[in-house]
Image: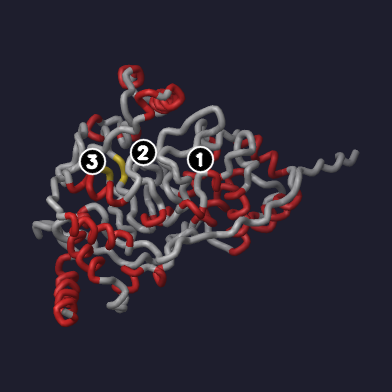
């Protein structure tokens, strides 16, 4: 039996190099899964220990929101996979949000952020979250003034950015710098260790799942490269979030988002679903398309999809196994897979092997104290 298992593992490993870069039909090659490289750092926002430390404080800083209850960490909690654990993200008090809170984990690698790719950098993401009407709902001038009345922040911004006063654009740059440290540690990822030569890092089920991932299940066609995402947009026929059908507060946000994103009056008045990429392109062929999420750290980031409709990875695999759902522009890549129960189990096992063996947790930082009055002007 041991020899049989050894032969099986050897055969799977030998085929991995051939299968990993091609689709199940062998007609198209895709970038192979691989360990993540160091997070890219923009030239106009270089890292420094002081900037990262300031960004961490601001990530936890409740005063960077409208009513002081919605810091970044309220929707991106380390203990909940750097999301908030709900189907739909927590909304600003008195509202409800309309999408799942995407994890901050490995967001440093995305070239398009948010489910419909509306911004292209973490520096652009931060104000959208802090100032968004159903997110942080903070007025940037008020938030900036709050920072100016906290001596510790005045000193920190002067040290990091050389400015006399804290400025919100610098606050967002600091937050982005901190978020670039919330990344996978390859030494703790079974798949990454396997690729780097530790052949016992994956068990038999994970090895079988890897072969399915690159072959019969053909996950590799969209979940490829080091990030396990091609960062492209697809309509998979995902079912709508039920709350949009019968919850007035969800419906208010749903309709308001359509209005804010500048759709036609007909689309606004008949808003029946989240149109995804269409909000950016206004091309009807993009209705229902959302960016491929990374499979990195998905072991810790449930629930899944842009509206959190799947609670487990097993449900996600079942959805794709049946060929997805009905979509306006459903991708031709989504087809029934006819996986057996054991194959589904193996596939889930491998996908989980793309996560670290323990979650990434950062302790809460110490935040500055109360506001202080500014000294009277010298006459």
Which residue is denoted by mark 1 in the rendering? 129
Q: Are circles 3 and 1 on residues that touch, CB within 8 Å?
A: no
The picture places residue 52, in percent across and down from the top left corner, at 58, 59
Q: Look at the image and tell me in which quarter the C terminus lies.
A: top right
Cα–Cα span, label 3 and label 1:
26 Å
Q: CA distance from mark 3 to mark 2?
A: 13 Å
Q: Is residue 346 left or right of residue 25?
A: right
Mark 2 lies on a secondary structure that is loop
Q: Pointer 2: what residue?
A: 307
Residue 126 located left or right of residue 209:
right
Q: Pointer 3: what residue?
A: 236
Furthest residue in direction front, as rendered:
1
Q: Out of 15 and 160, give the one closest to the viewer.
A: 15
Neighbour tally class for label 3: few under 14, some 14-19, many 20 plus, Cα within 10 Å:
many
* 1 and 2 marks in contact (CB < 8 Å): no
Local packing at callout 1 (Cα closer than 10 Å; few below 14, some 14-19, many 20+) is some
Residue 175 locus on image (x, y percent): 55, 51
Task: Give the Cα separation between the discs numbered 1 and 2.
Answer: 17 Å
Q: Nearer the viewer, residue 156 or 337?
A: 337
């Amino acid at each position: 039996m041991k020899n049989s298992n050894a032969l099986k593992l050897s055969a799977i490993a030998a085929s991995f190099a051939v299968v990993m870069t091609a689709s199940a039909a062998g007609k198209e090659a895709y970038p192979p899964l691989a360990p993540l490289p160091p997070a890219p750092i923009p030239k106009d926002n270089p890292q420094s220990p002081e900037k990262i430390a300031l960004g961490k404080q601001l990530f936890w800083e409740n005063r960077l929101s409208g009513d002081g209850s919605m810091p970044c960490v309220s929707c991106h909690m380390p203990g909940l996979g750097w999301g908030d654990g709900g189907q739909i993200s927590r909304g600003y008090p008195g509202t409800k949000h309309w999408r799942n809170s995407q994890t901050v984990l490995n967001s440093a690698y995305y070239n398009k952020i948010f489910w419909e790719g509306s911004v292209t950098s973490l520096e652009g993401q931060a104000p959208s979250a802090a100032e968004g009407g159903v997110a942080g709902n903070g007025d940037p001038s008020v938030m900036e003034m709050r920072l100016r009345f906290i001596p510790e922040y005045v000193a920190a911004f002067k040290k990091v950015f050389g400015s006399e006063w804290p400025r919100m654009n610098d606050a967002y740059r600091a937050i982005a710098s901190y978020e670039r440290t919330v990344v996978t540690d390859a030494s703790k990822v079974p798949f990454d260790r396997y690729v780097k030569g530790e052949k016992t890092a994956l068990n038999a089920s994970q090895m079988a799942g890897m072969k399915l991932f690159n072959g019969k299940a053909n996950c590799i066609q969209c979940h490829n490269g080091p990030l396990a995402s091609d960062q492209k947009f697809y309509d998979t026929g995902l079912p709508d979030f039920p709350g949009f059908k019968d919850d007035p507060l969800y419906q208010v946000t749903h309709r308001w988002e359509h209005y804010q994103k500048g759709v036609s009056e007909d689309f606004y008045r008949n808003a029946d679903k989240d149109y995804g990429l269409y909000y950016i392109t206004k091309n009807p062929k993009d209705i229902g398309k959302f960016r491929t999420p990374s499979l990195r750290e998905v072991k810790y980031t449930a629930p899944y999809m842009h509206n959190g409709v799947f609670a487990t990875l097993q449900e996600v695999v079942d959805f794709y196994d049946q060929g997805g759902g009905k979509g306006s522009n459903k991708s031709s890549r989504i087809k029934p897979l006819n996986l057996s129960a054991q194959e589904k189990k193996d596939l889930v096992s491998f996908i989980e092997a793309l996560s670290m063996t323990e979650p990434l947790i950062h302790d809460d930082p110490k935040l500055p104290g109360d506001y202080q009055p500014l000294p009277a002007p010298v006459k």
